[in-house]
Image (spheres, rainbow, N blue to C red):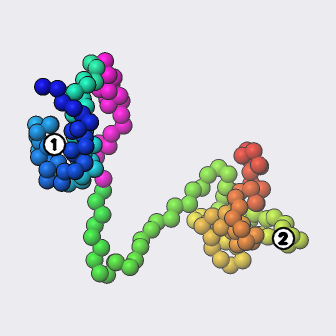
Amino acid sequence: METNVGKEIAGLERMTVGELRTRYAEVFGETTNAHHKQWLTRRIIWRIQAVAEGDLSERARHRARELANDADLRVSAPKTLQAANSSTANHTKATVRIATGRRLPMPGTIITREYKGRMLQVRVLKRGFEFEGETYKSLSAVAKKITGSHCNGYLFFRLIKEGGSR
């Protein structure tokens, strides 16, 4: 018995979710927990077409297995979020890490720069930068305070050149 794929597809679009689930079980030989009408319809259409017109070739199946073996898969479950209780519901805890790379002078160093006729001085701290009595977490934050717009702090204080070298 040859199936008319066009008629089958037209009939699927008029089915309810319950009817689609029954049809899915008939076509795939197993039940599904899915209740998404469009997903069920597409899966059933794919299976009907595969049966009527032929499935993947053995070469294509072999290639798919090769690709699946090379895929980077998560090997551990994601960390679950703990339910926030009423005392911590409105609070966020964050740790700020400040990278101390080789571009940065040693803590205690004072970086100076003349900007718009004014001599600026920024003290390098162990964790951040001090400018005019306030502590900032990055040189970019200091540069933004001075200029009013975002810019690279290393470039602004001329600790690196435009090309990225020191």
Percent across and percent down for residue 60 are 32, 22
The answer to whether residue 139 is visible is no
Q: Is residue 42 magenta?
A: no
**Mark sitting earlier along the chain (1/2):** 1
Residue 17: image location, x then y, percent: 18, 54
Query: Within the magenta stretch, is there residue 67?
Result: yes
* Magenta part, dominant SS: helix
* Residue 8, image quadrant: top left
Toward the right, the furthest residue is 117
Amino acid of disc 1: Tyr
Measuring 62% from the left and 70% from the top, which residue is drawn there?
136
Question: Where does residue 105 sit, x and y in percent of width and height?
Answer: 69, 57
Q: Residues within 10 Å of mark 2 (few under 14, many from 20)?
A: few
Is disc 1 placed on a helix, strand or loop?
Answer: helix
Secondary structure at numbered mark 2: strand
Determine the image quadrant of residue 151: bottom right
Q: Residues within 10 Å of mark 1 (few under 14, many from 20)?
A: many
Q: Amino acid at mark 2?
A: Met
Write the start and end of the magenta stretch as one range: 59-78
Who's the residue at 36% across and 34% down the image?
Answer: 71
Say which quarter of the image contains residue 72. Answer: top left
Which residue is nearer to you in this view: 18 or 101? 18
Instruction: Please name the residue that numbered disc 2 is placed on.
Output: 119
Nearest the viewer among 79 and 62 is: 62
Relative placement, left or right, of 72 versus 104 is left
Question: Residue 145 vs residue 18: left or right?
Answer: right
- Quadrant location of the N terminus? top left
Nearer the camera: disc 1 or disc 2: 1
Instruction: Return the residue nearer the eye: 113 or 77.
Output: 77
Location of mark 1 (residue): 24
